[in-house]
Amino acid sequence: MTAPWPPPPPPPTPVVVCYRHPKAAAPVKCTRCDQPICTECMVSAPVGWQCPSCLKGAPPVRRMRDIQGGAFSLTSGTPYATYTLLATCVALYVGQQVVPDLTGRGMVVSSMVARGELWRVITSGFLHGDPIHLLFNMLILFQLGSALESRLGRARFLGIYFVSLVGGSIGAMLLQSPTRGAIGASGAVFGLMGTVVVLSKRGRSPIEAGVGGLLVLNLVITFALPGIISIGGHLGGLVAGVLGGLVIRGLGERAGTQRVVLTVGILVVMTVALIGAAGPVAEERCASAVPSALEVDDPNQLRQALSELCG
């Protein structure tokens, strides 16, 4: 007996679909009912994955769709937000070389913020003074940002980043002369370090385990070079990052989507409140830079001095 040549092709492998969503492929089966389920129906269980039907009335659980992907997810895959921040800082540094006045227009200076230029408390965090300044900040941002964004999700990570950035600008204004400017992502980076320290636990990744030492080293360098490094910018970012980390820890790092949204909302409110406080802080710093009312007999002279300094 002879067999046909060439042999007939093997029959196509049937596609297993979800029993709840017939149009969706099912990569796994429910460990309880043994029914095939798609990623939409996959619910994390102590052992394997279970379907929603088997877990009705059970305590709240985390679904696969909440664990990965989405701005308000518990964690994130590729750290796109970190990459975007890195690219923005590098692009603006190139812009600083092409447009010399860009640095002056974007740095945070109390005398300019007091005139209403509140955008400076944000733009200053994306500008840098030289390649070494940029390199060190971007290196730490890449390491900590990637780890923290993957751990917290994009929304909470960005919330921490911007509240730390603005906190750094406020700190710089508080501890610097009202006519001295400050630039750099250092405040935001210090905030990330503060957040990681607050959230760190034993058994975490080597990067997180070494953040405490990295933070101490950077603080030593900060106080060792006060004329070069903005002490207020670093401390302000650190304090804001620690407070943001406490908010996340208080509401639960592994909380459900609703609490994640609440956490982001609180971080946004904190950021907006700091931006709103920038004007009064700048005005106070300007006022402290001129002779006090006791030293100026004519109030008009005092008002004129303030006007010349802060507009």
Image (tube, grey):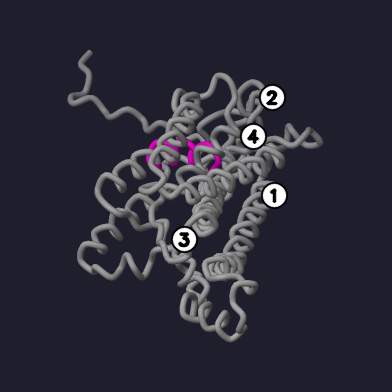
Query: Viewer-proximal residue, 78 or 251?
Result: 251
Q: Amino acid at mark 1?
A: Gln
The numbered mark at residue 258 is 1
- Element under disc 3: loop
Q: Earlier in the sequence, mark 2 or mark 3?
A: 2
Q: Earlier in the sequence, mark 4 or mark 3?
A: 4
Marks 1, 3: nearer the viewer: 3
The residue at which mark 4 appears reads as 43
- Element under disc 4: strand
Magenta stretch prevailing secondary structure: helix
Q: Is residue 71 visible?
A: no
Marks 2, 1: nearer the viewer: 1
User: Measuring 60% from the left and 34% from the top, which residue is drawn there?
Assistant: 198
Side (left or right) of 252 relative to 166 = right
The numbered mark at residue 177 is 3
Q: Is residue 204 above or below residue 224?
A: above
Marks 4, 3: nearer the viewer: 3
Marks 4, 2: nearer the viewer: 4
Q: Amino acid at mark 4?
A: Val
Q: Is residue 42 above or below residue 179?
A: above
Q: Is residue 165 visible?
A: yes
Residues tagged 4 and 3 counted as in contact (Cβ below 8 A): no
Cα gap from disc 4 to disc 3, whole angstroms = 56 Å
Q: Earlier in the sequence, mark 1 or mark 3?
A: 3
User: Measuring 41% from the left and 62% from the top, which residue is drawn there?
Assistant: 180
Q: Amino acid at mark 2?
A: Arg
Spot occupied by residue 82 in the image (x, y as percentages of width and height) = 41, 47
